[in-house]
Image: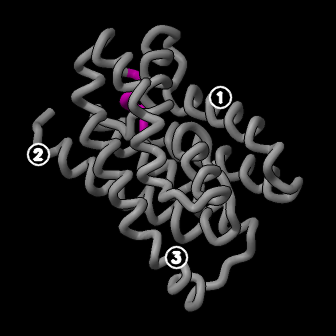
Amino acid sequence: MSYKQKILAVIVGSLFLSVGINFFLVPFELLDGGIIGIGLIINYLVGLKAGLAIIMLSIPVFILAWVYNRVYFFNSLHGMLFSSFTIDLLFPYHESFTTFVEFTAITSSIMGGIFVGIGIGIMLRFETSTGGTDLIAQFLSEKTHINVGVMIFIIDAIVIGAGGMLLSQDTFLLSALTITFVGLATSLCTLKFSRE
């Protein structure tokens, strides 16, 4: 796989991910799972930029990747940095988007999940990722031979469950719907990848 393909996958995947987060999840304070979800919780609670929080939270995972598998480290570092930058870059535009396009909370959670899942799936398909729990999911998928999208769904469910204490019941259920569609979209995008 060429370096140019990986760069393109990082750019396109990050744009899908950032659109899903900023234009569909943020307006309703919904969560994705994993480190992205934790970054969103921090953003909602204290106002720290989600992308910056994701970078900070990813440091321990990248230290583990450096020690155990430097291929994963190098394949994911660019994806994590660029996607975090893109999330923060597009954040100011979420209010403008929701002014012109109105979705119900359910539609927004589904669309957000699809966009985020496609973004993650594109990067994983080209052997890169956003790092964080995606990186952990890659490790676990390799060891267990379970599709990486399914592994991401399991990890995301754990984060949403923990985050549920900070959310209303409606928001919790909508976030659960979001990660379901993230898992489905990621699984579809990585189906061939998981068979190789």
Q: Quadrant of the C terminus?
A: top left
Could you tell which of marks 1 and 2 lies nearer the N-terminus?
A: 2
User: Picture coordinates of residue 150 (x, y %)?
Assistant: 59, 29
- Quickly name the residue at label 1: 154
User: Picture coordinates of residue 192 (x, y %)?
Assistant: 38, 31
Q: Residue at left 26%, top 55%?
A: 11
**Label 2 sits on what residue type?**
Lys
- Quickly name the residue at label 2: 4
- Quickly name the residue at label 3: 94
Identify the coloring: one colour
> Along the horizontal axis of the image, is 137 left or right of 43?
left
Could you tell which of marks 3 and 1 lies nearer the N-terminus?
A: 3
Task: Specify start and end residues of the magenta stretch as a single range.
Answer: 190-195
Helix, strand or loop status at disc 3:
helix
> Along the horizontal axis of the image, is 70 left or right of 152?
left
User: Picture coordinates of residue 153 (x, y %)?
Assistant: 62, 34
